[in-house]
Image: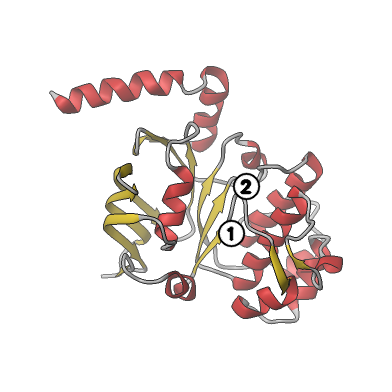
């Protein structure tokens, strides 16, 4: 029987040095489903994505399953090759490496789409520039999105895609993030964009601090990450509305009650 979940975390713990950051996460994402994680600063949101990708500096226990395969001990490049992609919150500048050449190393889709996507994302003049060197916040985020569009992963991690981005850029990034995920675009999409549109929906795990990206991206499930654990799960837009009205104070109260109940 085929596993209905594309991605699963089972009792996932993460340490940085001697400090335990994530304390037994359980998370399941179906094919075509987009999940959103909210949480206060320092709650471990970025740590979660980096540890799942297999970056160094993290000690993990538990299981990471992707397409039903245990990838917990695989190196970063193998996880990417299997179909996991990530957009970083603060990606580094890479001197001496042109954006076009970096994309060519991981591009899975037809190479002719590079110039078309670059045009749509206003990045044609950046393809021959060193990666992220002298780029603005919006330009960096668009370059990250361009790389993911050409990599064409099955599971996409997005770490605060609206961070450091102005309103004009967030609208563009939101539209093409939806396209990357195979979600429905807005009615004003043009003929060329319709021709590029994917038929198969991707899965995603999106971290947001402000929630602005949800004005553009169609998300299915929301989570609150708090105290190293997933405190609750709900409709992401309803969750965002509550957070905008009450902040995380209500979440803290609810979380403490749940912890006290477990201890008893």
Q: 10 Å neighbourhood of mark 1: few (<14), some, or many (≥20)? A: many
Q: Earlier in the sequence, mark 1 or mark 2?
A: 1
Query: Considering depth in this image, is 147 or 176 the residue closer to the camera?
Result: 147
Q: What element carries label 2?
A: loop
- For disc 1, the marked residue is 181
Asked if residue 251 can be seen in this view, the reply is yes
Q: Is residue 140 above or below residue 246?
A: below
Q: Quadrant of the C terminus?
A: top left
Residue 15 lies left or right of residue 127; in this view the side is: left
Q: In this view, does 243 lie above or below 129?
A: above
Labels 1 & 2 near each other (Cβ < 8 A): yes
Q: Quadrant of the N terminus?
A: bottom left
| Residue at (19% x, 23% y) in the render | 261
- Residue 145: percent from left, percent from top: 67, 60
- Residue 107: percent from left, percent from top: 63, 77
Q: What element carries label 1?
A: loop
Asked if residue 108 can be seen in this view, the reply is no
Query: Considering depth in this image, is 191 or 39 the residue closer to the camera?
Result: 39
Q: 10 Å neighbourhood of mark 2: few (<14), some, or many (≥20)? A: many
Q: Cα distance, mark 1 to mark 2?
A: 9 Å
When asked about the image quadrant of residue 127, the answer is bottom right
| Residue at (62% x, 47% y) in the render | 217
Q: In this view, does 215 lie above or below 116?
A: above
- Residue 177: percent from left, percent from top: 65, 55
Q: How many labels does the image show?
A: 2
| Residue at (73% x, 60% y) in the render | 132
- Residue 194: percent from left, percent from top: 74, 65
Which label number is shown at residue 98? none
Residue 9 lies left or right of residue 218; in this view the side is: left
| Residue at (55% x, 34% y) in the render | 237
Which label number is shown at residue 217? 2
């Amino acid at each position: 029987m085929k596993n209905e979940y594309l991605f699963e975390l089972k009792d996932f713990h993460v340490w940085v040095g001697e400090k335990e950051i994530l304390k037994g996460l359980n998370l399941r994402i179906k094919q075509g489903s987009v999940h959103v994680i909210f949480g206060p600063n320092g709650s471990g949101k970025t740590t979660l994505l980096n540890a799942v990708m297999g970056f160094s500096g993290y000690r993990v226990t538990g299981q990471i399953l992707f397409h039903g395969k245990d990838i917990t001990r695989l190196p970063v490049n193998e996880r990417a090759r299997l179909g996991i992609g990530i957009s970083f919150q603060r990606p580094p500048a890479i001197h001496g490496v042109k954006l076009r050449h970096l994309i060519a190393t991981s591009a899975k889709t037809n190479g002719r789409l590079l110039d078309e996507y670059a045009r749509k994302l206003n990045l044609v003049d950046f393809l021959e520039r060193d990666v992220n060197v002298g780029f603005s916040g919006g330009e960096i985020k668009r370059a990250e999105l361009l790389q993911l569009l050409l990599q064409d992963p099955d599971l996409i991690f997005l770490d605060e895609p609206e961070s450091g981005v102005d309103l004009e850029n967030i609208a563009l990034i939101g539209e093409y993030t939806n396209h990357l995920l195979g979600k429905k675009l807005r009615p004003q999409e043009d003929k060329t964009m319709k021709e590029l549109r994917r038929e198969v929906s991707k899965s995603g795990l999106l971290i947001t601090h402000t929630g602005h990206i949800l004005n553009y991206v169609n998300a299915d499930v929301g989570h609150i990450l708090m105290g190293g654990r997933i405190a609750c799960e709900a409709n992401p837009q309803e969750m965002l509305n509550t957070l905008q009205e009450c902040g995380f104070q209500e979440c803290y109260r609810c979380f403490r009650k749940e912890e006290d109940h477990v201890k008893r």
